[in-house]
């Protein structure tokens, strides 16, 4: 695992250096006519950023400083994302133009070779394509300016999202019709939260604002669909008292997400230390009064009527995600019920397993995607980069008679903000008829 961490470290450094060097060529082009002191100042400002990032990355790699200072780590990651997302846009502008000019140059060379023609006009155009310093209408300077201007857009958006989006909780109300729902459960209010990622929080007052919003919904039952921490169970310690205030008459039920197992920590002292970390997190759920479901089921009863609740461990078919979830094991010994609700952290579990092998499950509640913490939602129109990885990435989906709801997440990970895809508290009301 340590070698993997080193590869990630070296890959990140090489990537940022490549982007920096490329963008710097555009900056140099724009300041070449400026005074010497101005050029030195811009040079210092530009290269001080990657220098600081290199120092912090190296410190984290070999000393672990950022693992201790949570606030520094959180905002450093935000700073890193903002700076390099902006630079990457500029980089793409520049490299697309360079590739285009390269193809034009190759085509003209081929054309000249085949036709054996030498035209002064063509030679002049070739020089223009090769020589970025040529002064006429300087296309290179125009592209550099356009690229830097385009790069300023994500800088502004990401900065604003970090300031105002991270804790802007939204209550989304959904009515779900389940024809087989017993009359006693008609109007049942189920509240779902997901992906708390308590290790990323830095503002207790803002987080508690969301807790108050949850309590105000007066739900009959509450579901938490995984990822209470980023990596280590001790990230949750300062938040236990606050989240313990979430209660419901029929109980609070929770499951684990991919981040809860400690698999992304590369420096556990021993396998036993990693196992103890998970044991500690299980105890935290218990201490908060949450019923943690690990491949098991519970029967919810009301007025002598019953529906089934199934909770499984994480199961994902993207990347190296765990496949611990076992629906068959969770349903073992479960009595016949007219409605079954599944809690499964990763929506790919629904896509790959649930809707193909367990058609008796009426509703699946998931999270995991965060909606990429970035996207556009206008009325019925939704777009996010998340959709290119997960076909079901946010809100309600219906596949024949089965339904899936994907919560956008309560917290954040990596980039400490949200743009367009805001943190979500879901209130689902079950109905027997529309």
Image (spheres, rainbow, N blue to C red):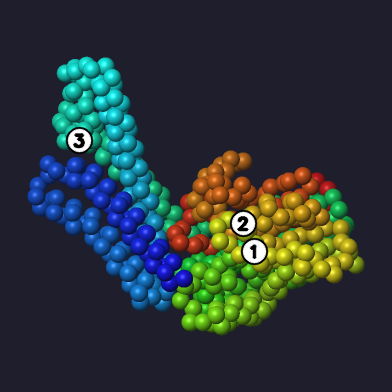
**Above or below: residue 300 compared with residue 85:** below
Considering the numbered disc 2 on the image, is that residue within a helix, a strand or a loop?
Answer: loop
Residue 39: x, y in percent? Answer: 14, 50
Spatial CA distance of label 2 from label 3 is 47 Å
Task: Look at the image and tell me whether residue 427 can be seen.
Answer: no
Checking the image for residue 123, the label placed there is none
Checking the image for residue 132, the label placed there is 3
Q: Judge the density around disc 3: few (<14), some (14-19), many (≥20) Cα neighbours within 10 Å.
A: some
User: Which of labels 3 and 1 is toward the front?
Assistant: 1
Q: Residue at point 54% right, 70% down?
A: 263
**Above or below: residue 149 compared with residue 248:** above
Q: Judge the density around disc 2: few (<14), some (14-19), many (≥20) Cα neighbours within 10 Å.
A: some
Spatial CA distance of label 2 from label 1 is 8 Å
Disc with the residue nearer the chain's start (2 vs 1):
2
Q: Residue at point 18% right, 57% down?
A: 44
Looking at the image, residue 292 sits to the left or right of residue 386; the answer is right
User: Which of labels 2 and 3 is toward the front?
Assistant: 2
């Amino acid at each position: 695992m340590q070698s993997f961490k080193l590869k990630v470290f070296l890959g990140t450094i090489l990537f940022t250096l490549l982007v920096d060097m490329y963008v710097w060529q555009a900056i140099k082009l724009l300041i070449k006519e400026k005074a010497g002191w101005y050029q030195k100042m811009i040079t210092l400002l530009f290269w001080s950023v990657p220098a600081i990032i290199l120092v912090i990355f190296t410190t984290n790699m070999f000393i672990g400083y950022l693992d201790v200072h949570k606030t520094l780590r959180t905002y450093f990651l935000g700073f890193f994302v903002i700076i390099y997302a902006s630079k990457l846009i500029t980089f793409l502008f520049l490299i697309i133009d360079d590739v285009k000019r390269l193809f034009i140059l190759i085509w003209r060379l081929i054309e000249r070779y085949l036709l054996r023609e030498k035209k002064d006009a063509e030679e002049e155009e070739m020089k223009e394509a090769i020589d970025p310093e040529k002064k006429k209408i300087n296309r290179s300077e125009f592209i550099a300016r356009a690229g830097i201007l385009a790069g300023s857009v994500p800088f502004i958006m990401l900065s604003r999202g970090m300031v105002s989006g991270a804790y802007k909780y939204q209550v989304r109300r959904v009515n779900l019709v389940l024809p087989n729902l017993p009359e006693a459960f008609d109007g049942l209010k189920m509240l779902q939260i997901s992906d708390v990622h308590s290790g990323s929080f830095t503002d207790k007052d803002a987080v508690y604002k969301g807790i108050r919003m949850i309590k105000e919904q007066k739900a009959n039952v509450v579901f938490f669909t995984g990822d209470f921490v980023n990596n280590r169970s001790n990230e949750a310690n300062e938040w236990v008292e606050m989240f313990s205030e979430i209660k419901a008459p029929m109980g609070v039920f929770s499951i684990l997400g991919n981040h809860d197992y400690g698999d992304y920590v590369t420096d556990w002292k021993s396998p036993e230390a990693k196992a103890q970390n998970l044991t500690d997190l299980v105890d935290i759920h218990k201490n908060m009064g949450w019923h943690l479901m690990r491949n098991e089921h519970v029967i919810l009863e009301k007025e002598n009527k019953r529906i089934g609740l199934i909770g499984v461990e994480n199961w994902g078919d993207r990347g190296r995600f765990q496949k611990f979830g076992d629906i068959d094991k969770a349903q073992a010994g479960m009595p016949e019920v007219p409605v079954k609700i599944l809690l499964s952290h990763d929506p790919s579990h629904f896509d790959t397993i649930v809707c193909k092998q367990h058609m008796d499950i009426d509703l699946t509640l998931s999270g995991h995607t965060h909606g990429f913490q970035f996207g556009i939602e206008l009325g019925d129109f939704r777009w996010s980069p998340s959709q290119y990885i997960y076909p079901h990435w946010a809100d309600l989906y219906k596949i024949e008679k089965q339904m899936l709801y994907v919560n956008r997440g309560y917290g954040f990970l990596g980039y400490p903000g949200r743009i367009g895809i805001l943190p979500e508290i879901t209130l689902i009301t079950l109905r027997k008829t529309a």
